[in-house]
Amino acid sequence: MAREEQGGGTMVGLHILESSSPSFTYQALGPLIDAATDDVYCYSRLPARQLLRHIPSNKASMWWISDHESPQSISPHTTEFITHIGQHASEATELMVVEGLDWLVARSNETEVLSMLQELDKLTRSWEFDLIFPVDALSFSTQFWARLTSIAPKMEGENPSDGEQELSIGEFPMVDEVSDRLPEPEAPTEKMLVHLVNLPRVGFTHTLLAKRMLQWKRMGFDLSALEPALIISDVSKSHAIYETVESDIICAIDCIRLMEANRDKLSATEREMFNFRLMGINNVREAAHELETLLSSR
């Protein structure tokens, strides 16, 4: 049975919620979750204990999107999502919220994710429930965004608050040097990888952090390790997480520049492998050591 919105329409199929933080996501979706009379499922990049700050445990079944294996986790791969959602969808399902779409694109590719979305769209219409993807448009290429919103229309009237609308990349340029331009596979445009000035502890706020995250996301970095800093009330702890991630990103940018300067010494497969690890902020120091060792041997 199709669910009725407050305005009298139906909410069935895939939808996009533009959001740059978990706080905004669940503030915007709170009324839908609270009003649900049937099953609600949330697939989040936040561990359950952090997600519980946004959603009461009695309102939704929660799954953690992570490579860490646990009874309540799901691996960030398209096949895993299709299988898992297919197993849990039923006539009693009313709403699903799935974060991390940008992570799925990074882990696979745009074509594979679009194929997954088409499968999920069929599933939602078969069981008549709504599946919402909270996403940051800056995380995707223009071409993918256009195709994404054709499959999953943006939710009407669900725009970020004035405070979040201020988080514009163009309004907050903090670049300390001329950028290098690196080609992005299968995309006609190029992303700039630049070192940004450090945000000191004095004057550090969650708003500044969100702006910085938008800048790094635009470069293409996976910021899953930094997202918890947005919801930690202790600004000192939030800043400590920021500094750790910033250090890794600085190292990653330096490594990618080194790799591009010596691209003739590396195979296409090696460049792709290192680029994936570095942009994913995945064991950056280890990857840097391996890259330097490899280049020194050639």
Image (cartoon, rainbow, N blue to C red):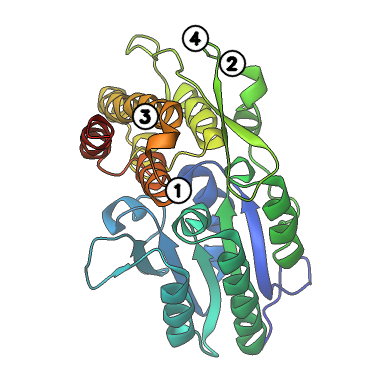
Query: What residue would you read off at disc 2?
Result: 173
Tell me whether the residue at label 3 lies in contact with that at label 2, contact meaning CB atoms closer than 8 angstroms.
no
Secondary structure, mark 1, is helix
Tell me where residue 43 appears, x and y as whole percent.
43, 64
- Residue 163 lies, in percent from the top left, at 60, 29
Q: Of label 4 and label 1, which has the lower sequence position?
A: 4
Residue at position x 66%, y 21% from top? 170
The residue under label 3 is 249
- Three-letter code for the amino acid on which mark 1 is drawn: Ala
Height in image: 294 above or below 87? above
Q: Which residue is mark 1?
A: 268
Q: Is residue 18 above or below residue 240?
A: below
Q: Quadrant of the C terminus?
A: top left
Judging depth in this view, the residue of 271 and 132 nearest the camera is 271
Is the residue marked by circle 3 packed among few (<14), some (14-19), or many (20+) residues within 10 Å?
many
Answer with mark 3 or mark 1, whichever residue precedes in sequence: 3
- The residue tagged with tag 4: helix, strand or loop? loop
* Near-viewer residue (44 or 223): 223
Q: Is residue 38 left or right of residue 77?
A: right
Check contact, mark 3 vs mark 1: CB within 8 A. Answer: no
Residue 277: x percent and y percent? Answer: 35, 45
Q: Amino acid at mark 3?
A: Ile
Is 169 placed left or right of 44 in the picture? Answer: right
Q: What is the C-alpha distance between the residues marked 3 and 4?
A: 15 Å
Q: Is residue 89 positioned above or below 6 on the image?
A: below
The three-letter code of the residue at mark 4 reads: Asp
- Mark 2 and mark 1 lie on one chain; the one further toward the N terminus is 2
Q: Name the one closer to the observer, 51 or 70.
A: 70
Relative side of 45 to 30, left or right = left
